[in-house]
Image: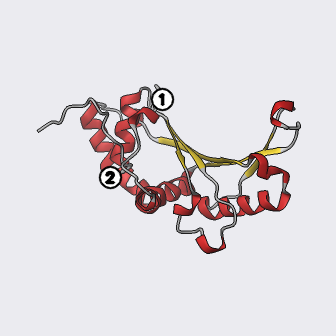
Amino acid sequence: MPRLQEKYRKTVIPAMQKAFGIKNVMAIPKIEKVVVNTGIGRLGKDEKTAERIAKELTLIVGQKPVFKKAKKSISGFKLREGVNVGIAVTLRGKRMYDFLDRLIAIALPRSRDFRGIDAKNFDKMGNLNFGIKESSIFPEINYENMKDVFGLEVTVVTTAKNREKGIELLKQMGLPIKKPAGASLQL
């Protein structure tokens, strides 16, 4: 069992029950899936570059990504229908917990000027969306051999019914979340 999943079962569930007064264990929010994607835009025309980025994304998440194609042509962006414009991976189960564990423990602390994830990145259903500017913060990527620097978008989908429960769930899981600027300190 992944370390983060074990933490969820042993510490997060009791803490969430106490914080929100939930009696039924099945009603406690949990992480449903994690979606990691990157836009390849102008790099999508070059097939070798797109394959290299897909290979690096596979190293990061541990699962083969899927190419996303343009749904329609847009002449202003010099975009044709059917051209690769992005690469996406949906993680569930063990791979999801492994990726989140590496993200929380290794990758985010390695990123430059990282002060925590802003609470504004949560939507009203408790899902988290944030971007990573450089994929090189992951230890699986060898920076010397990296030819193209690309960013990632990470979406953590939870079963929380509101924003507060989603924030508390991910805070309990160990994700560094910044306090809002107007929040008062509790002593």
Vertical order, 142 against 67 (above or below): below
- Say which amino acid is labelled 2: Lys
Seen as rendered, the residue at the extreme left is: 187
Could you tell which of marks 1 and 2 lies nearer the N-terminus? 2
Determine the residue positioned at 39% across, 49% down: 175
Callout 2: few (<14), some (14-19), or many (20+) C-alpha neighbours within 10 Å? few
User: Could you tell me residue 83's position as x and y percent?
Assistant: 85, 43
Determine the residue positioned at 20% across, 32% down: 184
**In the visual, does 126 lie left or right of 185?**
right
- Gap in angstroms between the C-alphas marked 1 and 2: 27 Å
Determine the residue positioned at 85% across, 37% down: 78
Disc ID at residue 165: none
Q: Mark 2 — residue?
A: 10
Cβ–Cβ under 8 Å for marks 1 and 2 = no
- Secondary structure, mark 2, is helix
**In the visual, does 139 lie left or right of 184?**
right
Where's the C terminus, which quadrant? top left
- Say which amino acid is labelled 1: Asp
Determine the residue positioned at 44% across, 56% down: 108
**In the visual, does 117 lie left or right of 136?**
left
Using the rendered view, name the quadrant where residue 60 is placed.
bottom right
Q: Mark 1 — residue?
A: 123
Q: Is residue 72 visible?
A: no
The colour scheme used here is secondary structure
Vertical order, 85 against 52 (above or below): above
